[in-house]
Amino acid sequence: MRKIIHFFDKLEDRVRAQLAHSPVLYSLIGGVGIVLFWKGTWETAELAPWLYGPASIVVGVLIMLLTGLLVSFFIGDSIIISGFKREKKLVERSEQEIIKAGQITTDQILKKLDHLEQDIHELKKDSQAQP
């Protein structure tokens, strides 16, 4: 079983690497795969006579609750996190607030890069000083 999983993992890596060079083809193939998956799911659910109407909704909600997908799929993580941080919704923010938040992030990244650059220079000096 482990060999089969390893084979498909490596195959996926190779296919993704090839398709990454053609994003339009990649999206078309991915779209067909998604539609066929849902088509198969729908047709399989039709085989169970009790999976119609409200029963289908209840089973679906239970599956999504058990797997933790209900909230993240329908609401999204970013909305939940922004609620915890008491941030305004993106639509309520002014252009200046959005630019300022992006600038702060950029400044933090630049500071970290400067720090890493200094560390690299120090390591080079140390390695050159040692015989």
Image: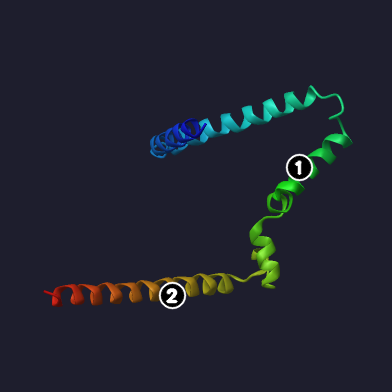
Q: Nearer the viewer, mark 1 or mark 2?
A: 1
According to the picture, the residue beneath numbered tag 1 turns out to be 63
**In 3D space, how far apart are the residues under numbered discs 1 and 2 (Cα atoms)?**
43 Å
Q: Is residue 77 above or below residue 59?
A: below
Residue at point 61%, 33% (across, down): 34
Residue 43's tag is: none
Residue 82: give x, y in percent of width and height.
66, 67
- Could you tell me which quadrant the C terminus lies in? bottom left
Q: Amino acid at mark 2?
A: Asp
Residue at point 87%, 33% (across, down): 53
Return the residue nearer the eye: 63 or 21.
63
Q: Is residue 127 left or right of residue 61?
A: left
Question: Dot 1, how many residues are within 10 Å of its Cα: few (below 14), some (14-19), or many (20+)?
Answer: few
Secondary element under disc 2, as helix, strand or loop, is helix
Question: Dot 2, how many residues are within 10 Å of its Cα: few (below 14), some (14-19), or many (20+)?
Answer: few
Residue 95: give x, y in percent of width and height.
58, 70
Q: If you read the primary sequence from the N terminus, does the residue marked by circle 1 or circle 2 appear first?
A: 1
Which image quadrant for residue 13? top left
Q: Is residue 109 left or right of residue 78?
A: left
Residue at point 35%, 76% (across, down): 115
Q: Is residue 59 above or below residue 66?
A: above
Residue 114: give x, y in percent of width and height.
34, 75
| Protein image colouring | rainbow
Residue at point 66%, 65% (across, down): 81
Residue 56: give x, y in percent of width and height.
83, 35
Return the residue nearer the eye: 76 or 8.
8
Secondary element under disc 1, as helix, strand or loop, is helix
Q: Amino acid at mark 1?
A: Ile
According to the picture, the residue beneath numbered tag 2 turns out to be 107
